[in-house]
Image: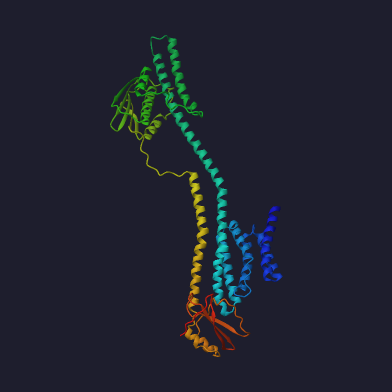
Amino acid sequence: MKWRRLGDVGLWAVLCFLVLAESGARGDPYWFQGACFAVLFAGVFLRRVRPLLAFTLVAWAQIVILAFALGTTHGVQIALVPAITLLSYLAGRRETQLKHFVLVCSWSLAGLLVLSLAVRSEEQATEAVLSWLVMLLLALLLVVLPWLIGRYRAQQALLASAGWERAERIEREQRMAIDQERLRERSRIAQDMHDSVGHELSLIALRAAALELDPSLPEEHRRAASELREMAGTATDRLGDIIGVLRDTEAPLVPRDEDVPTLVERAAASGLSVRLIQEGDAELSPMVDRAVHRVVQESLTNASKHAPGAAVTVSVTCAEDDVRVRIVDSGAVRPVPESVPSSGRGLDGLRERVRLVGGTLTAGPYQGGFEVVATMPRAGGRPEPEEEPQMSAAAAERATVRRSVRRGLITAVAAPLILGAVIGVVALGYYLIAGYSSILRPSEYDALTVGQPEREVEKALPAMQMIDPPGERYDPPAGWTCRYYRPDGPFSITYAYRLCFADGVLVAKAMVQSGSVTPTTETG
């Protein structure tokens, strides 16, 4: 806080030095210098809490100076202009409400025009309007442009501060997406392990059941086989709960590399009455080959659990474009044990797996048994519709920031240029209209005589006077009023006519040089 106050005092001292240097050279009164110092003090120390108010105070002080100084021989004090430009920039940095700034500028410029017309005589009104248009152009450069630059810088600072928050939010969202994907993958791995290990346990239970019914074994061995069968069933039932939580390490998706014939052979060796029928020999995509294996594996597991003693037929038919898998059992021959575990999700999992590769699966009772039929394309999964590349969240944020910054830069540069061009066209049009309305032809000028009544002279005069009379300063005698007219249109003359009136008569007429070129006249 201490250093901030010292900075405020230093800034106020610098701005006051500019006023003191200009006013000292011009010889301005002390009260004028003191008023400027007070206005600058209020502007500097209000610029943080009320930036627009600070700008308005200094701007209106300069407006009053312009209204009384424009068009006079004393010149215009401009020492407050640097402070106005600085406060306009700071207002843009801290006060970004466009409507407030537009209202302040509009009322300030309107006040400048009203004050200028109020303190000027009727003959100087057109010159006051042109001077106001020039001030309007300067306001674009010294007031509007700094405010737009300040607003652009404020947007940059806001975007930079918000960028870290956006980056942190995006990082959190990405972590959540990664965690969700990891959970999905772990769930899929768990399901695969459950199905694969469950199949193996079902085969163990099936073989134990065969040993339990073997009359050649002693009673104690058959009792042990019965216990083994029950334990395999219990292990299968608890597998779903135990496998639900996986470690972070990856687990194999298939217990071992085996094809459908090997799977059927192992099931037959375990005591299941199963035979394989293969038609056609075609190469399948990895996803389809895996889906075929899973359909056969799950179907054999279900047959061993829910149809003990049934004959099972596995048919794999490879056509030109697709592969058809059909598993049919003849129905249970022995009673189904009440302790047979069943999650009820096996067929739903198979349907989803087949659907992901673009196939269909049906399952239901068939001639006293059960049938599972799956049809899948040989080439692989269902062709996904082509999607337009999705922009990442970070890329979207960067694009938004760049668009905002680009719009701010275009506004900061283009807005003053467009406004300046419009005001320049208006000022030029006004100058041309006033210029062509103040032409006194050489023949009409020659016809005027000194001593002629002013009323008669005015009949020959144009509607307006020159708004840019010759630069030489003519100090007429007391009681004289002088008017200036051009002999031709704007931009084409090197001299002008000066007519002076006193006591209602024309007392003097003269041709005066306009610009730095020696005048040449052509009268007629």
Q: How many marks?
A: 0
The quarter holding residue 14 reads bottom right
Viewer-closest of 484 and 292? 484
Percent from the top left, x then y, of residue 226? 43, 15
Colour mode?
A: rainbow
Percent from the top left, x then y, of residue 451? 56, 90
Q: Who's the residue at 70% across and 55% down the image?
A: 6
Percent from the top left, x then y, of residue 30? 71, 70
Check the image and report above or below for 415 versus 354.
below
358 vs 510, left or right, is left
Check the image and report above or below for 155 versus 365.
below
Viewer-closest of 52 and 362? 52
The quarter holding residue 4 reads bottom right
Check the image and report above or below for 24 versus 518.
above
Q: Who's the residue at 58% across and 65% down the image?
A: 104
Percent from the top left, x then y, of residue 21? 68, 66
The quarter holding residue 65 reads bottom right
Would residue 1 be seen by someone viewing this image from the given angle?
Answer: no
Check the image and report above or below for 181 versus 17.
above
Quadrant of the drawing holding the C terminus: bottom left
Would residue 443 be seen by someone viewing this image from the given angle?
Answer: yes
365 vs 234, left or right, is left
Q: Who's the residue at 53% across and 41% down the image?
A: 171
Viewer-closest of 415 and 345? 415
